[in-house]
Amino acid sequence: MNLPPLVQSFVLHFGEMGRSWGINRTVGQIYALLYVSPVPLNADQIVEALGVSRSNVSMGLRELQAWNLVLLRHIPDDRRDHFTTPDDVWQILRVLAEERKKREVDPTLSVLRELLMQKPGTAEEKHAQARMAEMHGLIEQLTTWYDDVKRLETERLAALLALGAKVTKLMEVKDRVVSLARPRRAKETA
Amino acid sequence: MNLPPLVQSFVLHFGEMGRSWGINRTVGQIYALLYVSPVPLNADQIVEALGVSRSNVSMGLRELQAWNLVLLRHIPDDRRDHFTTPDDVWQILRVLAEERKKREVDPTLSVLRELLMQKPGTAEEKHAQARMAEMHGLIEQLTTWYDDVKRLETERLAALLALGAKVTKLMEVKDRVVSLARPRRAKETA
DNA sequence: TCAAAGTTTCAGAAATTCCTGAAACCGCAG
DNA sequence: CTGCGGTTTCAGGAATTTCTGAAACTTTGA
């Protein structure tokens, strides 16, 4: 591996991190390299930079494409494919969230749904099913929220983030306003 | 493996899922089993239920404890340790988020911070550092938000979730109210 | 149509991770 | 102290994943 030290540390870290992250070392390194590179790179340049085999790079790039984490760039007068990462980090975040959901959450959700359809035989199964229902409910809430939020433009999303827990303040205010606006009845909170 | 079919499917699914999830098959299975079990189980019962070796179960339980995903339960007049999962799914969610952050995000954040302190030599390094700064900024925003939100009680958190993207509506309302309340100057949005 | 440049596939070698059985360990009751 | 019920550790074999080099395939320009 022949890279400026700063870049090298970054690349190596991503390689290791990839592990706890569902992608392999090489894939992590390729991504990191493309992420910090000022220009799109072709496969051979990646081979050169990382010191891994050509085929390994090829497979890595395929995987990153499957994750929608790299883009193909055509350089004029060069037949070879060149690769970059999307450069807006928010965009990257969205892609990442979407892909992980697809891989880690959706399959579980569908298994749960299926199991919840079945008739429990024993009391034990009944209990198990109740627990599964709890899990299913939570995951469904989370994904609904996510589907909702992911549609926001970046600017609004950022604003929301910045607000953080203070949103609850906003909610309190709203509740108060609402209950002022119409005569108080029993405990009702919109 | 000798389990009611419903439970078995669930357990097997978690075993497979564990893969894309940073834990190994056995650990996933143990967790799933404890999650749906109506009573705390001891190690031998787990061995029996899953058909894996005693030592494998022992290691699995250790790992789950490291993740704070299982609880030790003492059953009167029984020397053996019994295990369950926390039963509030929201609680589980919190633990999970916390642990994953600790493992997947914090190390990256600290590497980034370190690399950002260094003086870039070449122009290439300078660009790389700028990219790292972007990434660092985003991650920091996200973790700040997370730290903020994780402190909310479950009820509020759920309310927030339910609101979903509608929060932005709330924000718009607020902006309008604020700008009504005081005389309009230049473009200022609190 | 062919050759050259580039890319992908794939079988098996290398590396890593997971799992097991045996042995060591621990705490306690007798 | 000793034996027992119980738990943990660990070396090495099994299984899985990752990586490589060679061969096959594709595209393009002449």
Image: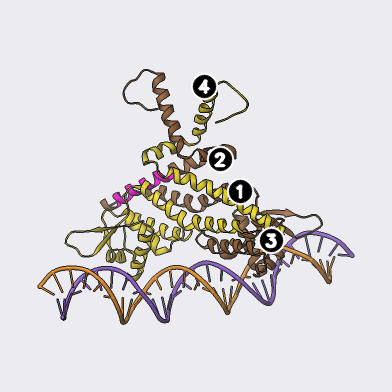
Chain colours: A yellow, B brown, C purple, D orange
Q: Image quadrant for the C terminus of chain A?
A: top right
Q: What residue type is labelled 1?
A: Val
Residue in the picture at 41% in, 60% down: A15
Tell me: B12 left or right of B123: right
Q: Which amino acid type is shown beneath numbered disc 4?
A: Ala
Q: Do labels 3 and 2 share a chain?
A: no
Majority secondary structure in the magenta region: helix
Residue A57 in which image quadrant: bottom left
Mark 3 highlights which residue?
Answer: A121
**Circle 2 SS class:** helix
Q: Which residues lie in the magenta part? A: B125-139
The subunit letter for the residue under badge 1 reads B
Mark pair 3, 2: CA separation: 33 Å
Residue identifier under label 2 = B158
- Residue annotated with mark 1: B89
Say which chain tag 4 marks.
A
Is B131 magenta? The answer is: yes
Q: Mark 4 against mark 3, which lies toward the viewer?
A: 3
Q: Nearer the viewer, residue B38 or B86?
A: B38
Above or below, D6 relative to B116: below
Looking at numbered disc 3 in the image, what kind of residue is underneath it? Gly
Element under disc 3: loop
> For mark 4, does the 10 Å Cα neighbourhood hold few (<14), some (14 to 19), or many (20 or more) residues?
few
User: What is the number of the mark on residue B99?
Assistant: none
